[in-house]
Image (cartoon, grey):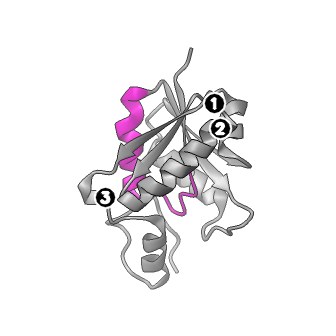
Amino acid sequence: MTKRAVFPGSFDPITRGHENIILRALPLFDEIIVAVGLNIEKKGYFPVEDRVRWIEQVFAGESKIKVRSYSGLTVDYCREISASYLLRGLRTSADFEFERTVGQVNKKLNPDVETLFLLTTPEFTSINSSIVRDIYKNGGDVSLFIPDAVDLPKL
């Protein structure tokens, strides 16, 4: 049986922290699906097609990583693609509290899916997509915070 994990998120845009979690999780799974979630409550800043393309570029040489977009409940998506694991990164204790609650609800909704947490390495703890977007929108240099393969459009 294939050990397939889903790493869900908005990835708006993908950060070096996301990249680090995915690369560190590779030895644990046969396949990781980086799943760009479409949230009808939240309009993304960058188009989903760009986000998917950027993630594909970041992991172009890694056959164990697939990139997809999806909508609806993440645990339903896991069921649909036969994934037994949800991968989540934790930066802070607040992340843990939120992710623990979501993980417990997901376990009720789909008992066949296990949620696994990886701690963010210290150098990436302060990075998140919201901060990167704010720097970008204000003309700042985001190159320190996003993978080299991501080429954001010029403003």
Instruction: Give above or below for 115 relative to 56.
Output: above
Instruction: Give above or below for 155 relative to 19.
Output: below
The residue sitting at 51% across, 62% down in the picture is: 13
Tell whether position 123 is magenta. Answer: no
Residue 123 position within the rendered picture, expressed as x and y whole percent measured from the top left: 25, 58
Question: Marks 2 and 1: CB-CB under 8 Å?
Answer: yes
48 lies left or right of 11: right
Residue 150 position within the rendered picture, expressed as x and y whole percent measured from the top left: 46, 58
* Gap in angstroms between the C-alphas marked 2 and 3: 31 Å
Residue 57 is at least partly visible in this image: yes
Under mark 1, the amino acid is Pro
State the SS at label 2: helix
Under mark 3, the amino acid is Phe
User: Residue 78: which quarter of the image?
Assistant: top right
| Residue position marked by numbered label 1 in the rendering | 111
Instruction: Give above or below for 133 relative to 4.
Output: below
Q: Where residue 108 is drawn, which disc sits there?
A: 2
Residue 147 is at least partly visible in this image: no
| Residue position marked by numbered label 3 in the rendering | 124
* Gap in angstroms between the C-alphas marked 3 and 1: 31 Å
Q: Could you tell which of marks 2 and 3 lies nearer the N-terminus?
A: 2
Crowding at label 1, few (<14), some or many (≥20) Cα neighbours within 10 Å?
A: few
Please give the range of residues in magenta: 9-28
* Gap in angstroms between the C-alphas marked 2 and 1: 6 Å
Crowding at label 3, few (<14), some or many (≥20) Cα neighbours within 10 Å?
A: some
Q: Could you tell which of marks 3 and 1 lies nearer the N-terminus?
A: 1
